[in-house]
Image (cartoon, rainbow, N blue to C red):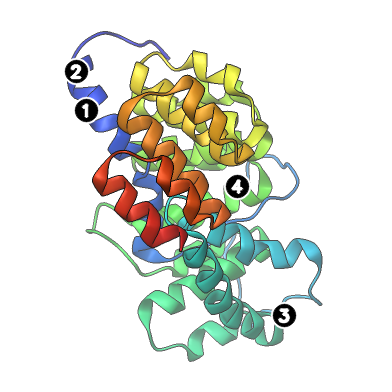
């Protein structure tokens, strides 16, 4: 991926926002993710209406909901994660009992899509993503796209990311798969600077390797990457030693929220970040 200096100022402005775009996009449709073995590119194969229930729960199956909640609550709070697991486990219990037919019993469209998404992940089969109904427009089937993304992460199959219809979605998918595989070289498959830096941050966080942050070509990208690694390590000293100003405060707040340790918020000087830290870490 070639990186130019064109519009770098505008890119730097939007980079911090993009660092959490994946979170908000996923929150729109409330979906899931999990991590499993690698596979080659998978063709979409139509499924029959009658599908066997998911097999008896295993540690891997339970991680489907846990990993989903880790994704959607990554930059929110521990309480978000706990509430998410409790709520989505109810849906997944129905899936384990009745298979995908459980989803047909759900009236709420978002919950129905969550159900289909979790089932697709449990089966590692993108054909079920065709049933997702959530969209942001006829040319942007966001629900289907992120269902495909979830299956790609479950299979650690970066080739499935090519099935996603938007550039942003494809780059996000590559970042998630790269993080799951802890493979920084997959980030070269991204097509935008923001996508590339987001991918570097995901891999650095997964490997807890702050040296990878040097691969980010912008200062803000490096700062976000360092914050991600510090959160993964739950290491406040990393925030204090390598970051300054508001970026340092945001980094500390992430750790406070992850640990549920409101006392760490006392280290934050920015009034707004401090207030949000106290609210989310409490």
Percent from the top left, x then y, of residue 264? 48, 47
Q: In front: mark 4 or mark 1?
A: 1
Residue 247 seen by the camera: yes
- 204 relative position to 105: left or right: right
Which residue is the site of mark 4? Answer: 153
Which residue is the site of mark 2? Answer: 9
User: N-terminal of the two: label 4 or label 1?
Assistant: 1
- Which type of secondary structure does the marked residue at label 3 adopt? loop
Which residue corresponds to the image point at 75% horizontal and 46% vertical from the top-left? 37
For residue 35, above or below residue 198: below
- Which type of secondary structure does the marked residue at label 4 adopt? helix
Give 190 or 5, whichever is nearer the viewer: 5
Q: In front: mark 3 or mark 2?
A: 2
Q: In front: mark 1 or mark 3?
A: 1
| C-alpha gap between disc 3 and disc 2 | 53 Å
Give 168 or 89, whichever is nearer the viewer: 89
Task: Evaluate if marks 2 and 1 touch, with contact meaning CB atoms under 8 Å apart.
Answer: yes
- Which type of secondary structure does the marked residue at label 2 adopt? helix
């Amino acid at each position: 991926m070639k990186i130019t200096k064109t519009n770098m100022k505008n890119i730097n402005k939007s980079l911090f926002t993009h660092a959490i775009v994946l979170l908000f996009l996923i929150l729109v449709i409330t979906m899931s993710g999990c991590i499993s073995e690698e596979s080659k590119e998978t063709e979409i194969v139509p499924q029959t209406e009658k599908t066997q229930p998911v097999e008896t729960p295993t540690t891997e199956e339970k991680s489907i909901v846990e990993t989903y909640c880790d994704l959607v609550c990554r930059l929110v709070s521990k309480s978000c994660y706990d509430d998410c697991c409790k709520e989505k486990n109810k849906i997944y219990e129905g899936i384990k009992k009745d298979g995908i037919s459980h989803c047909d019993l759900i009236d709420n469209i978002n919950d129905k899509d969550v159900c289909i998404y979790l089932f697709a992940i449990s089966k590692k089969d993108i054909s079920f993503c065709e049933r997702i109904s959530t969209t942001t427009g006829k040319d942007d089937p966001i629900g289907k796209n992120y269902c495909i993304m979830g299956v790609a992460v479950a299979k650690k199959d970066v080739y499935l990311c090519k099935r996603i219809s938007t550039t942003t979605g494809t780059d996000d998918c590559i970042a998630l798969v790269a993080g799951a595989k802890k493979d920084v070289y997959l980030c070269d498959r991204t097509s935008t600077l923001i996508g590339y830096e987001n991918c570097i941050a995901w891999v650095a966080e997964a490997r807890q390797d702050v040296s990878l942050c040097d691969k980010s070509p912008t200062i803000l990208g490096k700062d976000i990457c360092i914050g991600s690694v510090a959160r993964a390590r739950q290491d406040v000293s990393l925030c204090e030693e390598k970051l300054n100003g508001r970026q340092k405060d945001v980094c500390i707040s992430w750790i406070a929220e992850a640990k549920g340790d409101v006392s760490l918020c006392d280290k934050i000087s920015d009034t707004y970040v401090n207030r949000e830290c106290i609210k989310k870490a409490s």
